[in-house]
Image: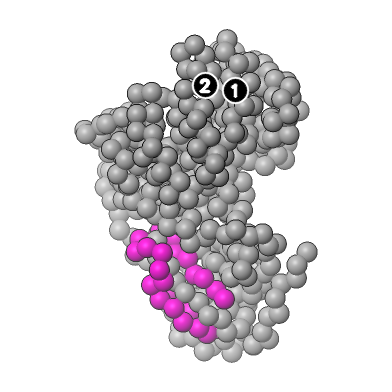
Amino acid sequence: MIAARPLATLSMAVAISALPATPGLAASNASAAKAASARSFTASVCVGTHLHYSDTPYYRRWPAVREALIDSGIRHVRDTQLASTVWPYRTVAARWQELASAGVRATLGPPHDRHFANAVARAAENPAVEATEGANELDQTGAGWQRRLRHTQIALWKETRKYANLARRPVLVGSLAFTSHWSQVTDDLTPYFTRGNLHSYPGGRTPDAGLTGHLDDAEPHFGGRRIWATETGYNDAVNAPPSASHKPTSERAQGIYAPQLYLDYFRRGIARACLYEFVDERADPDRDDGESNFGLLRHDLTPKPAYRHVARLLALLQDPGPKRPGALKFTVSGPSTLRTKLLEKGDGSFWLALWNDVSVWDPVTRTDRYPAAATASLIFGGPHAWSLYDLRSGTTPTRSGSGASLNLAVPVIPLLVRIG
């Protein structure tokens, strides 16, 4: 265990009184907060892809999709490992090799049909494979889905044990479309998976809206295993009918919520979160089809705000490491909607992410909201150099300075403070 760096013994009473009073803020004594590694955060960032879908840009415009994915900084994808007479693996094998060579790794879910064994064998050959996933949302397949969930999970576990390239890699339990349905699963599946699995769409609301309920529903069935959310995110089909199962947001709201979601899920202990998905699969000029509008890129591969903001977040927090993170003595004071996550890079710099967890979109009236920034005070345990980074403006500091305290206007999109 690497000890935290020595901390200054500046009297916190002096530090607090030296700050101008800010209405609505309650000061508290600084304490040493343990950081998570920046590398573990960037490794938690994942996105869904569909490399095999020949009628989408993933297939038809592959070189541009590949470059956009690599340029985004996202190094983990979730996809389906297809292998049949209709979807032969060899069609996209070279493309998986290109991603693997660029450091992109994949969680692969073989379809549980008559091609299942062949698909698992192809997953074992896939140079990008890092995990396999159980059946997808069987709770939407009618009566008896619980029995099918058990059968398919056991089958995946046994089949993956046959291959050296899969046997020691994570196996995810099959996902459910509605986490409340876990209450209907009476069988203990924990012998047959090493990771829990959530599908936790916020429904056009803030990223953590409903997340506590999702975790409460599912965690008791995961036996203490680490949890990955293999589907979550936002579509921007703002003209979809009111009956649409996935409530839309504007592109602006998606752009604010996407980086916030990655940080918030990581803050809540979810080891990996996969936004659905990387590219809008089909053109939808009327923007009335949710399934065609989940992408970080539009169908023509132009970037949405979400793509730009996530790419900037990852660029700022990129960290070759390794270094076991230490602790930083600080206090943040602000409203109850203020959220924070402390990270540390291998070079010893701390990066504090802050955001104001309030709605920027009304899912009922389908209109953007423009909430004021949260007023916050950041107090260190001693003087530090600091720089502020706003994802909306790029990857260069918007403000820099030094001292033992800092007053901040914290927006809804994460604000990064580099310390040290």
Residue 296 visible within the image: yes
Residue 13: give x, y in percent of width and height: 61, 86
In terms of image quadrants, where is residue 1?
bottom right
Using the image, determine if residue 85 lies above or below residue 61.
above
Horizontal relation, residue 407 to residue 419: left or right: left
- Of the residues shown, which amino acid type is indicated by label 2? Tyr
Residue that appears at 48% across and 26% down: 92
- Name the image colouring: one colour
Q: Nearer the viewer, residue 60 or 246?
A: 60
Residue that appears at 45% across and 86% down: 20
Residue farthest right in this picture: 1
> Label 2 belongs to which residue?
89
Labelled disc at residue 343:
none
Residue 338 visible within the image: no
> Label 1 belongs to which residue?
122
Q: CA distance from mark 1 to mark 2?
A: 7 Å
Judging from the image, what secondary structure is the residue with disc 2 in? Answer: loop
Residue that appears at 52% across and 60% down: 317
Is residue 239 covered in magenta? no
Mark 1 and 2 residues: CB-CB less than 8 Å, in contact? yes
Using the image, determine if residue 228 lies above or below residue 7.
above
- Of the residues shown, which amino acid type is indicated by label 1? Arg
Residue that appears at 51% across and 63% down: 353
Residue 413: give x, y in percent of width and height: 40, 58
Q: Closer to the N terminus: mark 1 or mark 2?
A: 2
Q: Which residues are magenta?
A: 392-420
Is residue 416 covered in magenta? yes
Using the image, determine if residue 12 lies above or below residue 206.
below
Residue 46: give x, y in percent of width and height: 52, 43
